[in-house]
Image: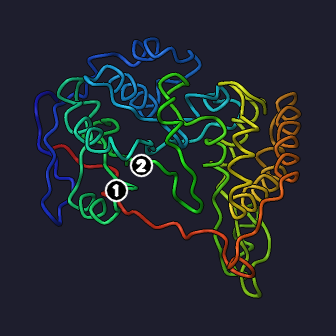
């Protein structure tokens, strides 16, 4: 199958995407990886990872260059060798890309995403659906959603989601990422290791107490008379463990900065509370218990250092948090179907 095809990506709206097949990258992913100076431990056989590396390389070569920083599971693949190890048990399937940008450059980033496939090949196809445009118009420019072509499997094109945040990471908790975006090109193309850790360990959700048996591995503590709060999913626990296994707590581009963690947590009691609960959950998780020695011992030691750091802090509790939620509810962002057929 070769040539340009029209894909119906939303039958209800008869929305189409023009795409050239077979998918191609004018700069092979391995060449892009070497050009970026990224480690050879990155598994480029994963189409999401290959797309992330290609996107970083294309952004660096754009005129003018486009500043983006990856976060989420794909960022952990780039920064953590153990996230790529199929035998260790910390690798998990990826479905989307998460990137942080600067709000003052958001229009340049969007223009780059619209045109990058024309220069770099159809493997780097990004697009907005009509639903994306509605969502983006209501977001105030702080969080945007796009879609991307992930891979081709026979007569099906696999689609994924590209989630963009501007200036702030803003989910259950929020923190500033502008300095990390500005420094990303010199530090692996991702948010700093400290903020990758915060992004994974800031999740919290309230569920009814009668449902607690269904999420026993994620239980944090009771919340009121009828609820409990739960922490991250197993895939996020795996990413947290990969991060602490591969990077010590300390200073430098390959360390999880204690100074950066301290600054963020002291300034936000709610974030401090959630991160502390989630690190305790990771420390008793089945994922950690299942790791072989000596990896298990290293993970335990570094988790203990992080828990001690968090416990040593005493952020001031803000008025209005007593007895109520100290986090924000995460909004749902439905997207188009994950695969579309090619006639």
- Residue 291 is drawn in which quadrant? top right
Left/right placement of residue 94 relative to residue 117 reads right
Mark 2–mark 1 Cα distance, whole angstroms, equals: 7 Å
Residue 33 position within the rendered picture, expressed as x and y whole percent measured from the top left: 45, 17
Mark 1 neighbour class, 10 Å CA radius: few under 14, some 14 to 19, many 20 or more: some
Viewport quadrant of the N terminus: top left
In the displayed orientation, state which residue is furthest to the bottom: 225
The one of 261 and 114 positioned closer to us in this rendering: 261
- Residue 302 is drawn in which quadrant? top right
Considering only order in the chain, which callout, 1 or 2, is on the residue closer to the N terminus?
Answer: 1
Identify the residue at horizontal 44%, vertical 66% (top origin).
332
Q: Can you tell which mark lies on residue 141? A: 1
Q: Can you tell which mark lies on residue 166? A: 2
SS at mark 2? strand
Residue 8 position within the rendered picture, expressed as x and y whole percent measured from the top left: 16, 52
Left/right placement of residue 48 relative to residue 271 reads left
Identify the residue at horizontal 65%, vertical 64% (top origin).
204
- Label 1 near label 2: C-beta < 8 Å? yes
Q: Can you tell which mark lies on residue 109? A: none
Identify the residue at horizontal 87%, vertical 53% (top origin).
311
Left/right placement of residue 263 relative to residue 7 reads right
Identify the residue at horizontal 74%, vertical 58% (top origin).
272
The one of 25 and 171 positioned closer to us in this rendering: 171
Residue 135 position within the rendered picture, expressed as x and y whole percent measured from the top left: 30, 63
* 223 lies above or below 100: below
Viewport quadrant of the C terminus: top left
Residue 338 position within the rendered picture, expressed as x and y whole percent measured from the top left: 35, 51
The one of 108 and 116 positioned closer to us in this rendering: 108
């Amino acid at each position: 199958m070769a040539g340009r095809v029209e894909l119906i990506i939303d039958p209800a709206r008869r929305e189409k995407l023009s795409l050239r097949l077979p998918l191609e990258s004018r700069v092979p992913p391995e060449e892009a990886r070497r050009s970026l100076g990224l480690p050879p431990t990155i598994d480029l056989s994963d189409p999401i990872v290959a797309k992330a590396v290609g996107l970083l390389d294309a952004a660096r070569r754009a005129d003018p260059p486009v500043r983006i920083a990856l976060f989420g599971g794909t960022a952990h693949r780039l920064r953590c060798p153990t996230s790529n190890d199929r035998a260790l048990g910390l690798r998990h399937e990826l479905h989307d890309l998460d990137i942080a940008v600067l709000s003052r450059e958001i229009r340049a980033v969007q223009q780059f995403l619209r045109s990058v496939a024309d220069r770099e090949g159809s493997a780097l196809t990004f697009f907005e659906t009509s639903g994306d445009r509605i969502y983006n118009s209501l977001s105030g420019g702080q969080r945007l959603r796009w879609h991307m072509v992930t891979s081709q499997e026979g007569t099906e094109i696999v689609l994924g989601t590209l989630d963009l945040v501007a200036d702030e990471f803003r989910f259950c908790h929020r923190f500033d990422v502008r300095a990390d975006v500005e420094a990303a090109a010199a530090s692996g193309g991702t948010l700093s290791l400290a903020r990758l850790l915060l992004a994974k360990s800031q999740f919290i959700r309230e569920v009814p107490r009668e449902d607690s048996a269904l999420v026993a591995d994620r239980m944090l503590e009771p919340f009121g008379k009828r609820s409990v709060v739960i922490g991250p999913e197993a895939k996020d626990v795996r990413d947290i463990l990969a991060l602490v296994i591969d990077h010590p707590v300390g200073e430098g581009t390959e360390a999880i900065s204690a100074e950066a963690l301290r600054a963020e947590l002291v300034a936000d009691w709610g974030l401090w509370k959630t991160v502390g609960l989630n690190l305790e959950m990771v420390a008793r998780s089945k994922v950690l218990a299942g790791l072989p020695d000596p990896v298990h011992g290293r993970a335990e030691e570094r988790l203990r250092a992080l828990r001690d750091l968090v416990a040593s802090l005493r952020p001031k509790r803000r008025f209005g948090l007593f007895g109520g939620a100290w986090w924000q509810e995460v909004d749902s962002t439905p997207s188009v179907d994950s695969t579309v057929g090619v006639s």
